[in-house]
Image: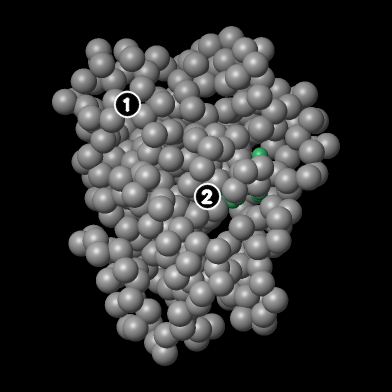
Amino acid sequence: MLKVDVIIGMQHGDEGKGKVTHHLLRKGGYTHCVRYNGGCNAGHTIYHNGEKFVTHHIPAGVFFGVKSIIGPGCVVDIHKFFDEIKMLREGGIEVYDKIFIAKNAHIIQGTHQRVDSREAKLGTTRTGNGPCYSDKYARMGKRAEDYPILEDYLVDMYEEFYLAYPDAKVLCEGAQGAELDIDWGDYPYVTSSHCTTAGACLNGFPPSSIRNVIGVAKAYETYVGTKQFQPESEVFNDLQVAGQEFGATTGRKRQCNWMSLPNLERIIKMNGVTNLIFNKMDVLESVGSWSVYVDHKRNNLFTFQNKEQFCDYVKSYFNMVDVVFSGSPEKV
Ligand code: IMP
Ligand code: MG
């Protein structure tokens, strides 16, 4: 029977999903890795055998010879797709017969990038992502199957998962985060895709196939875009510097703030998160400050003396068995 685990970002992207995907794939047991939303607006930083890779389109399965599919919920920039294959090859990663695109994924065109570049209001990544989704829903888009150059890479999700590999074990890798979701984020300061567990289902996986939902958070929050997110306080500049908080796709400074536990709880409940991971604990440690908001509007702050108090409180707040705190960019 088809079994699917889903990795979702629980904040505004850049939570370290790439690292978690890489970790789970290394442990083995998956036959496929599927990216289920977004396009080259995403940037996943992955350390593989000590070497740093930044991927935008291609799922992390490729690092372990696991069949990697860019799903129908995604939009694809063909030039960047081929550039990325080249980058992986040059980095010694075997890509032959491992990388695929769902034939009904949509393709980003030059006009999409031009429109996106003029759209400064939201601070998008200007990669043509939003305009491509606009055309998809306006039923004016072009799909991967419309491009002969992609012929060798095309896959039909039904044939793959219901005829060829009905016992597939799939790891669905999300991009961005639930707080950027088109429906559940802070509209209009959102991306144009579904960054939720439901977004993974939209790629042809029924809810009953979902086993674990791994929610990935950062121990403090970051956001890139035009809305004001970072409060006035030196500590957030310290976090930005210590955490090297620059966008992996655009190089922009990420705004920093403490994390909001009630906001995370909302994401956990609405996405059926079963496992929780908090990344970048080493950054809080190096700055030596430990705080969380305990209300949705970020007015009410709890501050702790040390890491142990911080972890105990966060763990008891969510009352979940599987909560992991990670302080290394290379491992979980
Ligand atoms: P778009 O996805 O390029 O349309 O940008 C919409 C908003 O989502 C902007 O605030 C972007 O900075 C943000 N965004 C898009 N992709 C990512 C990501 O992978 N990480 C963090 N922020 C992102
Ligand atoms: Mg990123």
Q: Quadrant of the N terminus?
A: top left
Percent position (x, y) of residue 43?
A: 57, 47
Residue 179 has which mark? 2
Q: Is residue 318 left or right of residue 121?
A: left
Cα–Cα span, label 2 and label 1: 23 Å
Residue 36 point in image, percent of width and height: 44, 33
Give the quarter of the image for residue 160.
Answer: top left
Q: Is residue 327 left or right of residue 253?
A: left
- Residue lying farthest right? 118
Q: Which is more toward the observer, 102 or 298?
A: 298
Judging from the image, what secondary structure is the residue with disc 1 in? loop
Q: Which residue type does callout 2 highlight?
A: Glu
The quarter of the picture where residue 112 lies is top right
Please tell me how many numbered marks the rendered image carries: 2
- Residues packed near mark 1 inside 10 Å, few (<14), some (14 to 19) or many (20 plus): many
| Residue denoted by label 1 | 205
Which residue sits furthest left?
1
Quadrant where the C terminus sits is bottom left
Q: Is residue 135 visible?
A: yes
Q: In this picture, is 288 found above or below 193?
A: below
**Going 48% across and 67% down the picture, which residue do you hit?**
295
* Residue at the spot 65% in from the left edge and 16% down from the top edge: 138
Rate crowding at label 2 as few (under 14), some (14 to 19) or many (20 or more) other CA atoms within 10 Å.
many
